[in-house]
Image: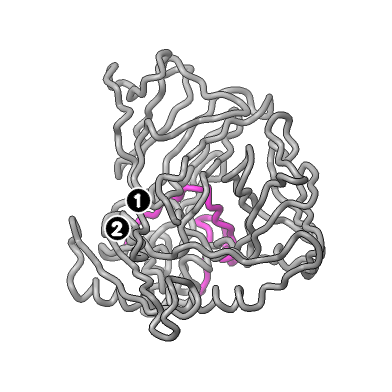
Amino acid sequence: MQKTALGFLTLRARHVIKVSYPPCHWCSREVHETCVAITNQIEQPDSKLTARRLSALKANVMKTIHSRILSALAILSTAILLPGANAQTASTVPVGFMSLPLTLNQTTAIGLPLLETATFSGPVGSFTTNTITVSGATWTLGQFATPGSPFMVTIRTGLQAGRTLLVIGNTTDTLTLQTNGTGLDAASFSIVTGATSDTFELFPGETLGTLFGTVATSGVLPSGIQGGGNSVLADGVQIYNGVKFVTYFFNTTLSKWVMVNGGTADQKDTILYPDDGLLIARRGPTSSLTLLGRVPDTKLLTELPNGSTNAVSVRFPTDTTLAGLIFSGPGSWTMGNSVVADTVNLWNGIKWVPYYKNAGGVWNMVNGGSFDQGATTIPAGSAILILKRGTANSGAATFLSQALPYSVN
């Protein structure tokens, strides 16, 4: 993906979709996010979508993009400059969308590489192991920790740059974060304040309801996900809970999201973390899932606790490879034979295929010989399953580091 001098943003997935922000026809200024004239071009290098479907997709998504740009403008125009050295601002980067194929009677591993527009971006004033305080902020108590409307924080600079955490509470100037086993003040990994203070951004997260929809028309949600009267007829969205994948579906009889074998409680507020990978079992006709939002503009950092298995989103809207996965401290990535090594599992449409680094650091497939598999492609918008060996809660986690593979400047 790249943004050229002409303002093109290309999101490379199964279909390539270009969204252009030309000089504004209202004010003739340079490319910006306020008043924009949007053009777009859709290419189909390997698409089987019909012209009618592509036309409808184009119209629907461009309408949504335009709506979100107006929302970003509203945020920018109402940003309040705070007294002193720190200022509360909103930051925006290019937006676009990805179209991921969903094939009848197949299960697809997906990630969520596109994000909502940030509502705040600025320096860390002070912090504890799980809180960030912003000097002069005037937030409303609890506004970022409302059920059904989650917010996330991404650290933008420093040793923890790219780490994304859920907001679980807030006061007028302080955010409390879900940091799991690694605090913001972790030894040799801490964020910093002062003259070179680390910065962060605050943005809305996603839930089952916000991402896929909560109102079905003829059994189909706005996202294209198929609902049904039971789990056999409906698409299944599978979320890993640390032990197994738990399946949710939109029950058209109850008009709510429910958990398979989990009763009738509405699960629409179930949080979908940006780091998490999902599986979608498609029961409706072959179609596609459109993901829309802004592209990440920093490196990404995903925590992998010892003694755990994690379904992880490949969080950039570009393809990568096994060799492109970099594991960093604190903690370490275990290499060796397939019995003792940490493993990365890639979904082949039917099952997870495990890979590991041998003692020499070469990627091998389990039971696949000694051939170097480092060039194996991990498609954009997909998910992987990572087994991190070791004893749970016995030391610092290892972090999956993904360097920014493009420029948004």
Q: Position of residue 168 (x, y in %)?
A: 72, 56
Apparent side of residue 137 relative to residue 207 in the rendered image (left or right):
right
**SS category of the residue bearing label 1:** strand
* Colouring rule applied to residues: one colour
Which residue is the site of mark 2? 101
**SS category of the residue bearing label 2:** strand
Q: Quadrant of residue 182?
A: top right
Please report whichever mark, 2 or 1, sits nearer to the chain's N-terminal start. 2
As shown in the figure, which amino acid type bears the numbered disc 2? Pro
Q: Residue at x 34, y 22 (%)?
A: 364
CB within 8 Å, label 2 to label 1: yes
Which residue is the site of mark 1? 108
Residue 307 or residue 153, whichever sits in front: 153
As shown in the figure, which amino acid type bears the numbered disc 1? Thr
Q: Position of residue 225 (x, y in %)?
A: 39, 66
Residue 369 or residue 84, whichever sits in front: 84
Question: What is the total number of numbered labels drawn onto the structure image?
Answer: 2
Look at the image and give the residue range highlighted in magenta.
Answer: 254-283
Marks 2/1: CA–CA distance: 8 Å
Q: Residue at x 47, y 40 (%)?
A: 402
Q: Residue at x 79, y 54 (%)?
A: 133
Apparent side of residue 102 relative to residue 171 in the rendered image (left or right):
left
Give the class, few, some or many, for how many residues have Cα within 10 Å of label 1's Cα (few <14, many ≥20): many
Residue 265 or residue 109, whichever sits in front: 109
